Image: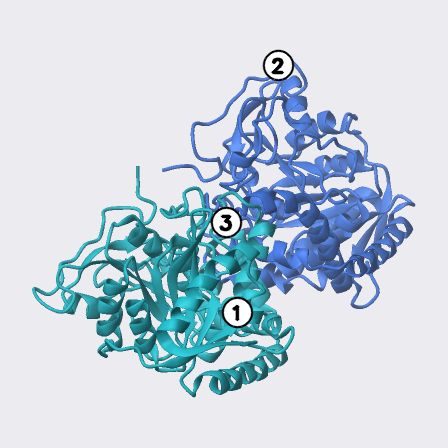
Chain colours: A cyan, B blue
Amino acid sequence: MRDDAFIPGPRLTLPGAGAGPLAGLRFAAKDLFDVAGHPTGAGNPDWAASHPVPERHAWAVRTLLEAGASLAGKTVTCEVSLGILGFNQFYGTPRNPAAPGCLPGGSSSGSASAVAAGDCDTALGTDSGGSVRVPSSLCGLYGIRPTHGRIPVDGMCAQAPSFDTTGWFARDAATFARVAAVMLGEAIPDAVAPAPLLLATDTFALADEPVQQALLPAVERIAALLGKGLERITLGEPGELAVWGAQRNVIQRAEGWQTFKPWIDATNPRFAFNIARNMALAASLTEAQVALANSVRERARARARLLLDGGAILAIPTTPFTAPPLGLPLSELDRHSERIGLLCSFAGLTGVPQVSLPLATVDGKPAGLSLIAARGQDARLVAIARAL
Amino acid sequence: MRDDAFIPGPRLTLPGAGAGPLAGLRFAAKDLFDVAGHPTGAGNPDWAASHPVPERHAWAVRTLLEAGASLAGKTVTCEVSLGILGFNQFYGTPRNPAAPGCLPGGSSSGSASAVAAGDCDTALGTDSGGSVRVPSSLCGLYGIRPTHGRIPVDGMCAQAPSFDTTGWFARDAATFARVAAVMLGEAIPDAVAPAPLLLATDTFALADEPVQQALLPAVERIAALLGKGLERITLGEPGELAVWGAQRNVIQRAEGWQTFKPWIDATNPRFAFNIARNMALAASLTEAQVALANSVRERARARARLLLDGGAILAIPTTPFTAPPLGLPLSELDRHSERIGLLCSFAGLTGVPQVSLPLATVDGKPAGLSLIAARGQDARLVAIARAL
């Protein structure tokens, strides 16, 4: 039986540098990252055939190899990084080892699945709309969407450049922090600086009640660790999270259409219906719609500065639910994706870093708690994760 | 090398009844027609897996078998009958034996290709938006879209019920007429009744200049045969063909969405981008848009009655151009499809029968001339084809 987490064909492995801070670790790379001499598949059967075989490693792959980690394989991704629930109609849906019979979350589905299954110690993902955060939550992993623009994305297939980031997964906080130090190029502090923890009540209200209840004890623990109290706030004005979700969608889709349009026009590729539908809808967005969405983005950014620039940490549920079962109709999948978008849009719109921590379960299935800080404070978030 | 005209796998053949009016003929069936005990593929890899294997032959298959023809195989179709140029991104594009290196036209692409290549004598196609007429024109064949509602469509995959018809192809007029007599259940008259021939100048003006010039001598021949003169008319008011094309698209897509929506929701199937895009756009059509389009349809129907109920025959180019080359970008393919739609919409909207006759070539590539008559006068059109 093929392990769904990895792309079809012989496993692509590479040894890491003989020594380094990650010596002994095995990593997997989402099939959106270039590995020199091997086609990048991007989760779609028509991508590799119409793109040249890369001559150089992606920055993230090179960085991990040079730090001593070895490549354990390339992993299945949702088609061209689109899809937040983790299914792939061409290569199969990677299993969720933490919630058998359920979706793994995506689009970095195979990377999360491989880490959760123990097939590797860490794995590279990309996160434009939640593609590391969501599978972290649903598969019970540590995962990060770093500050936008902080980590080079060269050699990584683009989707929506003003959203695209490189992230990674780990099963334990120590490994998560070890990889973070290399990827961020910054030591992870041992001490956690005191800070207020902001509980965004409007984000919790969007989650299923059992998820809310399961996450609250973790919030209390983190507030205690941070030592400056727990403050209940709302992330947005009433209804604003829905606006952010919808307008984030507009900008991200419009950028994605610009990215993929030349390829689509040249090759009329095959897609699962939902992927093509989203592209088709993106193609009909007007400049006025995108301009409106960008003005909303500025409001979200202002809100992020106001809440976080003083050093506070924000806590939100990563996903509103635990892993949905396999086999749902598309209309149900769409509703799930839309709900996820309400929670993932804030970091996407504002570019702040977000880590998802596997601190709760509901009926045995994981639910992640996210911590968010001001731009550039990635290492602080990782330090909190490790200190817990 | 696989013959692209036929679906992958062993050739599905069945003997016909021992005797009958079609004894000795071999026919192919587009893979939208049921053959008992064998999955119907509909040109899409996810269709067969999510539909039961048919227990009975489609009416058209049964009728040809009972008339003595034998089944020579099932042929590639554009996905779920959508696509007028004949490409299929999953199974390959059937070759156009009459125009090497060019598209065959669709969606009954494989059926036209198989007949043009001599792999069979006749073949079943479906025509909702031009899917028999267009490949007839581009592959140099006789083809018919019968009066809508005249021929049973049971066992044929539906697309847009108020447009769907069963048609057929042949290389020569005698075979075309022989099959017609069986399919129509009506003798094809030997004599051609005198009638005026109407040349629709607005339809000719939509065709490439060389196509117009190549078709005009055939028009003159037919006018002479019909013996009551050639009258130049316009099919619509100025600009009306474009309106008909656009509104036909609205109705057909809206009906297609109703047909395919449950399947798409249940399975999120894979499609070429252009197919999924058209479905996605259909999904967003409003009732008001469809109601407006239906009022336009009534105008077209009134026009058909006015022009044709007195017994006149209408001549239009089947397609505005000869077979386009393979390898065009999607934006070019879209422009070609839109132009075809301007000519194919009249019969689609009004339900009148249309035959395409292989009476011209441009630079060695076929261009079909279409004859159109009042509803129910299918046999008359076939008689004219045979008498030429």
The one of A132 and B326 positioned closer to us in this rendering? A132
Horizontal and vertical percent for residue B118? 51, 33
The answer for how far apart the CA atoms under marks 2 and 3 are is 54 Å
Mark 2 packing: few (<14 Cα in 10 Å), some, or many (20+)? some
Q: From the viewer's perspective, is the residue at label 2 or at label 1 nearer? A: 1
> Which residue lies under the disc numbered 3?
A324
Q: Are marks 2 and 3 on the same chain?
A: no
Q: Mark 1, chain letter?
A: A
In this view, the residue farthest toward the top is: B18
Give the amino acid at mark 1. Answer: Arg
Residue B281 marker: none
Q: Do tag 3 and tag 1 residues touch (Cβ < 8 Å)?
A: no
First in sequence, mark 3 or 1: give its number.
Answer: 1
The one of B186 and B42 positioned closer to us in this rendering? B42
Locate the C terminus of chain A and report the quarter of the image it occupies: bottom left
Locate the N terminus of chain A and report the quarter of the image it occupies: top left
> Which residue lies under the disc numbered 2?
B17
Please, is residue A216 above or below residue A240 in the view? above
Q: From the viewer's perspective, is the residue at label 2 or at label 3 nearer? A: 3
Horizontal and vertical percent for residue A246? 59, 70
**Residue drawn 77% across the image and 42% down it:** B353
Please, is residue B70 above or below residue B117 in the view? above
Give the amino acid at mark 3. Answer: Pro
